[in-house]
Image (spheres, rainbow, N blue to C red):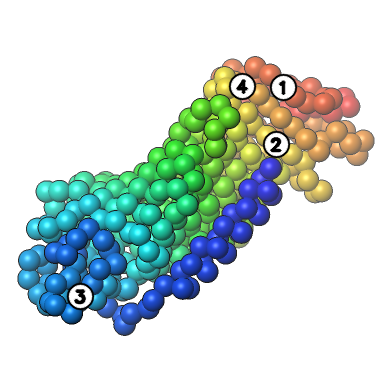
Amino acid sequence: MARLLHRAALIACAAILLALGAASTAFALDAFWQGRRDAFWQHGNNGLGVSNWYSKPPLRGQPLEVPNRAAIFAEGAREYDIVIREPESISLMVFRKNPERYTFAVRWSLTIRNGGIRNYDPSPPLFTIFKNSAMLFRDNAELVADGDWKSALIKIRRGGQLWFQEHSRGGNAAVENYGGDIFFLAMASAGRMTINNNPQPDGGKPSITDFGGRSTGGNAHFSNGRNGILSFADTRGPVGEGVSAGRIDNDGRLQVGNTALNVRDSFTQGSRGTLWITHGETRHGSIHVKNDMRLGGTLLTTGFFMPDLVGRHTILRAEGRRIGKFDNETLNGGRLEYGPKTVVLVIGD
């Protein structure tokens, strides 16, 4: 399942990059959003001295073409609800303190490179990614906010996609995933994000968050709802650091594979949750929880039950308390032993 998801991700990425390559390029430019023409990001100077982008904050400055370096959003604009309906690329988005919230409807693709997002407003910008559309963070892009404010709120509709590539970092953004896909690739990190794979109706498209390459969950909080898929099975994490997450609340499908996952806070699996751990050629998956571990739902284990793997395999370990146990276990042989802080899979003893 994890490999199929990853292959689908790469195919989708290729299609998006082709679309981005077809977009027209402009000279390197910074500009302030004013929205004098309309609500569309891609409308610059129309030759009549009217543009959505200007050289100074609203409502001053000279009309400019659409920027591709820094887009600055300040108070006083005529339009605060912005629509992206063509492939667009920007290096940095800056949000100044403002009495109104900026919102963005991503209806094709928005790529943010290098600088990422800088938010200086207690009401962070809201991005909604619609079906067959994508928002991509690339290079060294990072989502940063002043103080404890959120850097961005991101909602993903069914069929929308959110990508973190190269060395991009999610900062402390908050994401609500309603049947879309979130991909972390290469050396990307979720940072201190909160990611909610919201419950979807049974049989509907699952909400997916998938880590590949050497990406990591950092110190992020993951809430994986029913019919959600949270997968660390295709990543090995940063060299010398491994794969981590901040906190995990799982009531959907959590795929660890043969990855060693370090949970820096707590791990909770509800009665609907499924945890999938495998044994690969040389190692098996495991979860190490810094604080408390609460268990319910179903445990699935595959690849352990060969003659040369007879013995004891620690698959979960908590430094705090272990509370509860799995309601259902699909083991295909062997048994589980529950200690005060551990869960051990025993084969052939």
Query: What is the C-alpha distance between the residues marked 3 and 2?
Result: 57 Å
Residue position marked by numbered label 2 in the rendering: 277
The reply, left or right, for residue 24 in relation to residue 243 is left
The mark nearer the N terminus, 3 or 2, is 3
The mark nearer the N terminus, 4 or 1, is 4
Q: Are marks 4 and 3 in contact (CB under 8 Å)?
A: no
| Image spot of residue 110 (x, y percent) | 39, 61
User: Could you say which disc has been placed on residue 329 in the image?
Assistant: 1
Q: Are marks 1 and 3 in contact (CB under 8 Å)?
A: no
Mark 1 burial class by Cα count in 10 Å: few <14, some 14-19, many 20+: some
Query: What is the C-alpha distance between the residues marked 4 and 1?
Result: 8 Å
Q: Amino acid at mark 3?
A: Asn
Q: How many marks?
A: 4
Q: Against 168, is 150 above or below?
A: above
Residue position marked by numbered label 3 in the rendering: 46
Query: What is the C-alpha distance between the residues marked 2 and 4?
Result: 14 Å
Marks 1 and 3: which is nearer the front? 3
Residue beneath the point at 16% across and 56% down: 79
Mark 3 burial class by Cα count in 10 Å: few <14, some 14-19, many 20+: few
Q: Which quadrant is the C terminus positioned in?
A: top right
Residue beneath the point at 78% across and 35% down: 302
Mark 2 burial class by Cα count in 10 Å: few <14, some 14-19, many 20+: many
